[in-house]
Image (tube, rainbow, N blue to C red):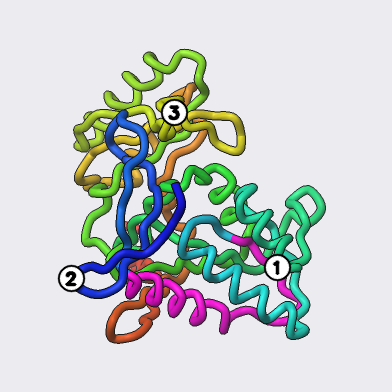
Amino acid sequence: MASGRLKGRQGLWRTGERSNLGRDQGYFRYAVPMDVEVHKRAAAARALEQVRPGMRLGLGSGSTARHFVDLLGERVRAGLTVVGVPTSEETRQQAEDLGIPLTTLDELPELDLTVDGADEIAPDLSLIKGGGGALLREKIVASASAALIVIADESKWVSTLGRFPLPIEVVPFGLAATRRAIEAAAAASGAHGPALLRRTKDGHAFVTDGGHWILDAALERIAEPALLAQRLDAIPGVVEHGLFIGLAQTAIMAGPNGARTVERPLLVHPPGGVS
């Protein structure tokens, strides 16, 4: 489906495609306010200020990270020397087209900084990621980085994670058993809801860059993300999940009033040690 523009009550909108998360009904046409794209680019520009010559960068995936890679490409063409590790094949292609030097974690296992987007950001900077399907590589790259900066428009800031369906990457073998275990783990963690197979617009299972499938868990509210993450990690058919806990140090969110930066709260233990 070709992207384009249409006029909305609030101004210009951009049309495109996005997975219909939470439903086994393929893809749907949606409209994104052009202002939102402006906000995403503003957040990306703020993050770019943290990039220094010689840095080893993790390059995120998704619509907001795409703005960062675009802007980074401009800096590289102006003489900035960096090297990047992409988190998806789409990002790899974009970076190559822009002339950004790339490497792999096999060649460079430690990175200075990763900049990536998020589907939801909680006040403690716990995240839901994976709406674009790249959660496994995104988490591997983020975990190999000294710092992770998350960039987003301000609509991604939430008081509690869960309204965005939680992506869970799974192996195709034994899907029904894995789905049942995921739903039971979520319920035991106080988050009830179905885990539905993500499909492409032609009705086939969405396949990740790693050759896996994705179940999107429509949980509405995840009161204890760490507990749910622990339970999901214990399920054999689960490759990875979209709960990113303790990885992001900084979130940059932009809206009508500009960009704001939020740092992850430091844990302060009471005198005498951990209570």
Q: Which amino acid does label 1 sit on?
A: Leu
Q: Which residue range is magenta in the image?
A: 34-59
Q: Which residue is drawn at 50% across and 45% down?
A: 135
10 Å neighbourhood of mark 2: few (<14), some, or many (≥20)?
Answer: few
Q: Residue at x 42, y 53 (%)?
A: 245
Q: Earlier in the sequence, mark 1 or mark 3?
A: 1
Give the image quarter of residue 208: top right
Q: What residue type is labelled 3?
A: Ala
Give the image quarter of residue 142: bottom right
Q: Earlier in the sequence, mark 1 or mark 2?
A: 2
Mark 3 or mark 2: which is in front? 2
Q: Is mark 3 on a helix, strand or loop?
A: loop
Q: Does the magenta stretch include residue 160?
A: no
> Considering only vertical position in the picture, is 100 above or below 256?
above
> In the image, 103: left or right of 142?
right
The circle drawn on residue 234 is: 3
| Residue at the spot of label 2 | 9
Q: Where is residue 93 in the image (x, y as percent from the top left)?
A: 68, 54
Q: Position of residue 176 (x, y in %)?
A: 37, 15
Q: Residue at x 44, y 76 (%)?
A: 43
Residue 148 seen in render: yes
Residue 123 seen in render: no
| Residue at the spot of label 1 | 98
* Camera-side residue of 17 and 244: 17
> Considering only vertical position in the picture, is 189 above or below 128?
above
Distance (Cα) linking label 1 and label 2? 35 Å
Q: Which residue is drawn at 41% across and 47% down?
A: 131
> Considering only vertical position in the picture, is 98 above or below 135?
below
10 Å neighbourhood of mark 3: few (<14), some, or many (≥20)?
Answer: few
